[in-house]
């Protein structure tokens, strides 16, 4: 557990990184990721396990290459919280390209669930999405183990006008936001256990996948709009890609809706496999009788 002094020092360092040129911060994070990859660790083993499960046809050399690139991206993404949490709106404007199939300034935007996917640019993408909407939004977050870090993250993520709620809170909060015409941001592509989940394929593996998105969309009469934050090459910043609303979703079939979400995710992982969040135990929950992959 981090002490208050540790947290204070970390905040001071992040604020320092937020005011120096972004290219220096990004290169520092990249170098730190390369260094950490040289050290055997549990997270490194998780990355390799996930890549072997999802891409058994890849050569060992290709998996090693993608694993190292991903580890560097993952550590860099933590370092770049500095810019995302403490950088000015003007700085974010310069760093993030917006490619949206939805008019975010539309005053008549219907009730909308913005569905984020856990690529390494999700933090930057979520913050800039809220900034671009120019209205109060709602956002669900996964609780942190350290309460001080949680309070910091909530405050900085909410700085452009976001109502934050823990994923553990009641779904009625989300439905109230939708009823009040507040866009809601949430992620659903991680293993949160069997509550409100089902097993459907993800790269050919039966994977515990949330069904809550379809249910919330149905009850809240909301459209579902997927978005992805991409890290641009050569330390140029990020691209926020907002896609067309999913048609005929939810379908009324929880398994079919969960599989559709995984198919969308598979398609975009193949475009930039090094940027998906492989350090997460995506296959932690197994069907009854199966042994753990980890």
Image: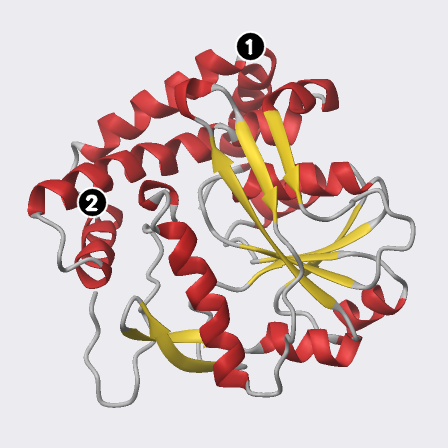
The label on residue 247 is none
Residue located 44% across and 59% down the image: 265
* Residue 168 percent location from the top left of the image: 62, 69
Quarter assignment of residue 127: top right
The label on residue 41 is 2
Neighbourhood count class around disc 1 (C-alpha, 10 Å): few under 14, some 14–19, many 20 upward: few
* Residue 21 percent location from the top left of the image: 54, 10
SS state under label 2: loop
Q: Residue furthest left?
A: 60
- Side (left or right) of 80 relative to 181: left
Q: Nearer the viewer, residue 278 or 243?
A: 243
Residue 37 lies, with reference to residue 143, above or below; the image says above
Q: Mark 1 near mark 2, Cβ–Cβ under 8 Å?
A: no
Q: Nearer the viewer, residue 99 or 147?
A: 99
Q: How is the image coloured?
A: secondary structure
- Side (left or right) of 199 relative to 229: left
- Side (left or right) of 231 relative to 35: right
Residue located 49% across and 19% down the image: 236
Neighbourhood count class around disc 2 (C-alpha, 10 Å): few under 14, some 14–19, many 20 upward: few
The quarter of the picture where the C terminus appears is bottom left
Tell me if I can see residue 230 in this picture: yes
Residue, disc 1: 20
* Residue 32 percent location from the top left of the image: 31, 25
Residue located 63% across and 44% down the image: 126
Tell me if I can see residue 195 in this picture: no
The residues tagged by marks 1 and 2 sit, at their Cα atoms, a distance apart of 31 Å
Quarter assignment of residue 143: bottom right
SS state under label 1: loop
Residue 251 lies, with reference to residue 143, above or below; the image says below
Mark closer to the chain start, 1 or 2: 1
């Amino acid at each position: 557990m981090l002490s208050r002094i540790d947290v204070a020092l970390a905040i001071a360092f992040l604020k320092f990184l937020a005011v120096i040129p972004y290219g220096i911060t990004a290169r520092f994070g990249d170098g730190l990721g390369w260094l950490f990859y040289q050290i055997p660790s549990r997270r490194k083993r998780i990355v390799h396990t996930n890549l072997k499960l999802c891409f058994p046809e890849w050569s060992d050399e290709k998996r090693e290459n993608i694993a190292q690139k991903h580890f560097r991206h993952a550590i860099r993404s933590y370092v770049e919280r500095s810019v995302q949490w403490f950088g000015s709106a003007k700085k974010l404007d310069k760093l993030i390209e917006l490619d949206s199939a939805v008019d975010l300034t539309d005053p008549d935007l219907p009730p909308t669930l913005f569905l984020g996917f856990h690529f390494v640019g999700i933090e930057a993408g979520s913050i800039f999405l809220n900034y671009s909407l120019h209205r109060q939004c709602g956002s669900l977050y996964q609780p942190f183990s350290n309460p001080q870090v949680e309070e910091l993250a909530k405050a900085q993520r909410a700085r452009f006008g976001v109502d934050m709620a823990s994923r553990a809170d009641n779904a009625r909060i989300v439905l109230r936001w939708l009823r009040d015409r507040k866009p809601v941001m949430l992620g659903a592509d991680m293993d949160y256990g069997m509550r409100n989940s089902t097993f459907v394929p993800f790269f050919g593996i039966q994977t515990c996948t949330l069904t809550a998105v379809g249910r919330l969309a149905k009850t809240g009469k909301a459209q579902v709009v997927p978005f992805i934050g991409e890290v641009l090459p050569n330390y140029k910043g990020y691209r926020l890609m907002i896609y067309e609303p999913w048609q005929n979703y939810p379908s009324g079939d929880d398994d079919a809706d969960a599989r559709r979400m995984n198919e969308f995710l598979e398609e975009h992982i193949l475009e930039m496999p090094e940027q998906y969040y492989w350090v997460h135990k995506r296959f932690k929950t197994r069907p009854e009788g199966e042994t753990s992959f980890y």
